[in-house]
Amino acid sequence: MEYLFQELTGRVISCAYKVHSTLGPGLLESAYEESLAFEMSEEGVKFERQKPMPLIYKDVKLDIGYRIDILAESKVVIEIKSVEILSPLHMAQIMTYLKLSGCRIGLLINFNTASLKDGIKRIIL
């Protein structure tokens, strides 16, 4: 299971490296999301941006504003950050999105790092 969707996540990570090498750290998350979406489109990766994710509570669908930054090919949740340090809250957020979406793989990408390899976390649910 560790290598689930390895080819897809590898393509997304390659796109993230292109964005980081071009823009560097220090921008808003929205700039990185837009740029990553552009690169993924160029690479032929199908995706949805700002994918609404309702919460089901006692068989009732609640639209409370959860949104996945990018959902790649309906399989991989991508959560984009531009923060000094990733916190346990960021990890909890992507775990929640994985549970709500039914996906098993997520990428938590923090673009606010000197080296992007230090900002990428691959999460398996």
Image (cartoon, grey):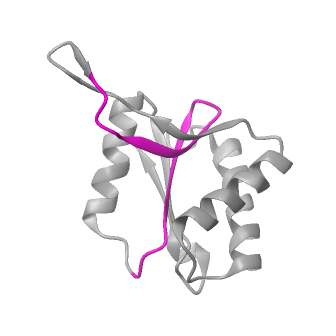
Image: 57 above or below 81? above
- Quarter location, residue 71: top right
Give residue 23's position: percent from left, percent from top. Answer: 71, 78
Tell me if residue 125 can be seen.
Answer: no
Give residue 21's position: percent from left, percent from top. Answer: 74, 78
Q: Residue at x 75, y 49 (%)?
A: 40
Q: Is residue 59 left or right of residue 90?
A: left
Magenta span of residues = 62-84
Q: Is residue 57 left or right of residue 111?
A: left
Q: Is residue 5 left or right of residue 50?
A: right
Query: In the picture, which quadrant includes the C terminus?
Result: top left
- Within the magenta stretch, is there residue 81? yes
Q: Residue at x 47, y 43 (%)?
A: 68
Q: Is residue 67 left or right of residue 95?
A: right
Give residue 38's position: percent from left, percent from top. Answer: 77, 54
Image: 108 above or below 3? below
Q: Residue at x 68, y 52 (%)?
A: 12
Give residue 26's position: percent from left, percent from top. Answer: 56, 83
Tally of numbered tags? 0
Tell me if residue 89 can be seen.
Answer: yes
